[in-house]
Image (spheres, helix red, strand yellow):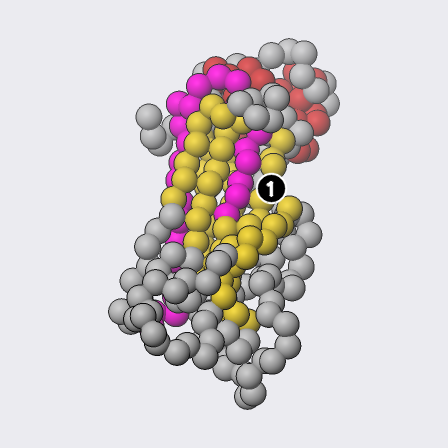
Amino acid sequence: MSDAEWKNRCGSEWGLLGAPMPDGLDWKSVYEAKPFGRNLLRNPSPFGLSKDIPPHKPDLPDEPDFGPPRFQPDEDFSGWTTNTEVLPYDRSGIPAGAVVCQLPRYSWFSLEQLVDLKAEGLWEELLDNFQPEIHIQDWYESQLHDSIYQLQVKLLGADKSTVISEYTTSPTEDRSRDSRAWKEVSHVFCSYGPGVRYVHFLHKLKNMFLNGFYKTMCTNSTVVVRPSKSCS
């Protein structure tokens, strides 16, 4: 198949009407990369869970854990860069003179990835002029605290530091009832401007140690590029 035929195949199958499709690209390689409609994140469910299966209530330890405190989970986080930030004890709300035997110790566990959009099969003219939609989705669960989850997604330039567009959220949890359900976070980047070459995806999960380790979990994290134009 000629390069022109591969180019026509890309345009027709992906519905790239009006998108720039320069002749200099290796359209066979672009087609085989299949940059549209697939998740560009590696290991999107590092806890081995699915949003389609309700999370179970964490098991309470039979005996208190008298060993050193844990601050991060130990699942398979390949594909992610991880970091742990141990938070100081929260003594707010404790009356003066009160005797406290033990306090929970919280930590933030962050997971981040950098997606190279050109390496995934997209091309500069498409990103700069057509600006296909970039869909972000994530799911998380726990009821450890009022603030257990943060998400920050940045569209970066070629230098990997210039921020062209950004989405952040830090929801406050309703702990008045035990829901035990996955909570969805989603966003669509569109009309973000020229120069985007990378997507930096970072979420932070709050964990707690108190006579045992209790964690916030995430699953089905996604970065998907779509040629459709459903937002402005």
Residue 71 lies in quadrant: bottom right
**Residue at 60 percent of width and 67 percent of height:** 70
- Which residue is the site of mark 1? 113
- Residue 26 percent location from the top left of the image: 70, 20
Q: Give the residue furthest to the left.
A: 176
Say whether residue 93 is left or right of residue 72: left
In the displayed orientation, state which residue is furthest to the right: 1
The range drawn in magenta is 178-203
Q: Is residue 118 above or below residue 106?
A: above
Looking at the picture, does residue 110 appear above or below residue 9? below
Q: Is residue 11 above or below residue 213?
A: above
**Secondary structure found at label 1:** strand
120 inside magenta stretch: no
| Disc 1 crowd, CA 10 A, few/some/many (<14, 14-19, 20+) | some
Which residue is at the front of the view, 173 or 195? 173
Examine the rendered structure and indicate whether residue 63 appears above or below residue 80: below
Q: Is residue 185 magenta?
A: yes
Q: Quadrant of the N terminus?
A: top right
Q: Nearer the viewer, residue 1 or 148?
A: 148
Q: How many marks?
A: 1
Quarter of image, res 166: top left
Left or right of residue 29: residue 44: left
Q: Nearer the viewer, residue 104 or 193?
A: 104
Give coordinates of residue 84: x percent, y percent. Answer: 59, 54
- Residue pushed farthest top? 23
Q: Residue at x 60, y 26 (%)?
A: 160
Task: Work out which quarter of the rendered image holds the C terminus and state it.
Answer: top left
Residue at 40% x, 28% y: name it.
190
Q: Residue at the location (67% across, 16% down)?
A: 25
User: What amino acid does circle 1 point to?
Assistant: Gln
Residue 129: give x, y in percent of width and height: 48, 15
- Side (left or right) of 79 relative to 169: right
